[in-house]
Image: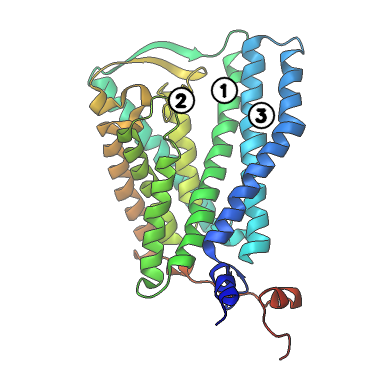
Amino acid sequence: MPPVTRLHWLFWNPDEHRPRALVRIAFQTALTVLLLLVLGFLVLGPLWGALRTGGLSQDLADFVATALGTTLGSGLSVVLAVWLASRFLDRRPFADLGLHLDTAWWRDFAFGLALGILLMTGIFWVEWLAGWVVVVEYLRSPAGIPFVVAIWGPVALFLVVGFYEELLARGYWLRNLAEGLALPPLGPSGGLLLAYVLTSGVFGALHLGNPNATWTSTANLVLAGLLLGLPVILTGELAISIGLHITWNFFQGNVYGFPVSGLSANRVTFLAIEQRGPELWTGGTFGPEAGLVGIGAMGVGVLLILAWIRWTRGSLALHTEWARYVPAPASQAERLLSGESSAP
């Protein structure tokens, strides 16, 4: 095989008529960054400036701009980049990233929402009963913004964040890595498990730049990634993960007033608290995700997810279809690009 052909083979899978897994992920990541820059330059920058000069208070302008920046900027960029990459690089329907929105999907989604509420409520009660949190205010919101109006900002924020982070990390990255790693001697099961661990590691590492982050908090967020990825590798759907991610974040920051992954999300919160107690247990300024109480909640979450899937599916097994790709028929242009003959 000539050197050029070997190099071509490293980047293109002729059997699947598409780029290799790491190439697909690299293109999707680059496309996300490009869309973020374009949206920021054309839409979000001018919008932020208009809000600051439009007669709104500083608090209100910053509040609206931040919410819109996350929902319109990050959310739209990630979803659009994943859709384009899925359609034109992966050669698969968008729904095959874990978004088959049937009755079972919505039932699992409701379970995920309930699970996030239950786990974060458990964390709050453990710390409150231990005397590690004290409620100092109720229904807190920025000056000049009624609470019943302000609370919808975080609701929208965490709905969007829960969806696009799971779509990216557990939907796109995990599925593509599983397919790329499902080679001998790993096979589909080994490829899926290795992709599950690797994407959880990346999920933790991406939070290293958060305020108050430490190596301990990063390791704990790897565990959070494993919790969020568990239902995906067992069901092939994102429903439980998205629901859990949404309510875990919202109840953590905007119901019980904890920091969310080091970020102070409690400018609008049902309960404003002062956190005390040993940082080893509470997570300190990073929030419960960095403490032993948070790890305990994650352990309970694993057991409840396994019980739910066993109850609704009748058994527990790896969804190895996520590591298997059924090639779509290649077009004439794609056959030419891959160097294949167009002759039958």
Q: Position of residue 160 (x, y in %)?
A: 58, 38
Nearer the observer: mark 1 or 3; the answer is: 3
Q: Residue at coordinates 41% horizontally, 41% vertically from top-left?
A: 205
Secondary structure of the residue carrying tag 1 is loop
On-image quarter of the C terminus: bottom right
Q: Position of residue 243 (x, y in %)?
A: 49, 44
Q: Which residue is mark 3?
A: 68
Q: What amino acid is labelled 2 in the image?
A: Leu
Nearer the observer: mark 2 or 1; the answer is: 2
Secondary structure of the residue carrying tag 2 is loop
Residue 104 lies left or right of residue 280; in this view the side is right
Q: What amino acid is labelled 1 in the image?
A: Ile
Q: Position of residue 145 (x, y in %)?
A: 62, 12
Q: Earlier in the sequence, mark 2 or mark 1?
A: 1
Other residues around mark 3 within 10 Å, as few (<14) / some (14–19) / many (≥20): some
- Compared with 220, 100 (above or below) is below
Other residues around mark 1 within 10 Å, as few (<14) / some (14–19) / many (≥20): many
Residue 193 lies left or right of residue 113; in this view the side is left
- The extreme front residue here reads 3
Q: Which residue is mark 1?
A: 151
Q: Which residue is mark 2?
A: 263
Q: CA distance from mark 1 to mark 3?
A: 14 Å
Examine the rendering and report whether any part of residue 102 can be seen. Answer: no
Residue 252 lies left or right of residue 74; in this view the side is left
Q: Position of residue 182 (x, y in %)?
A: 43, 70
Residue 22 lies left or right of residue 197; in this view the side is right
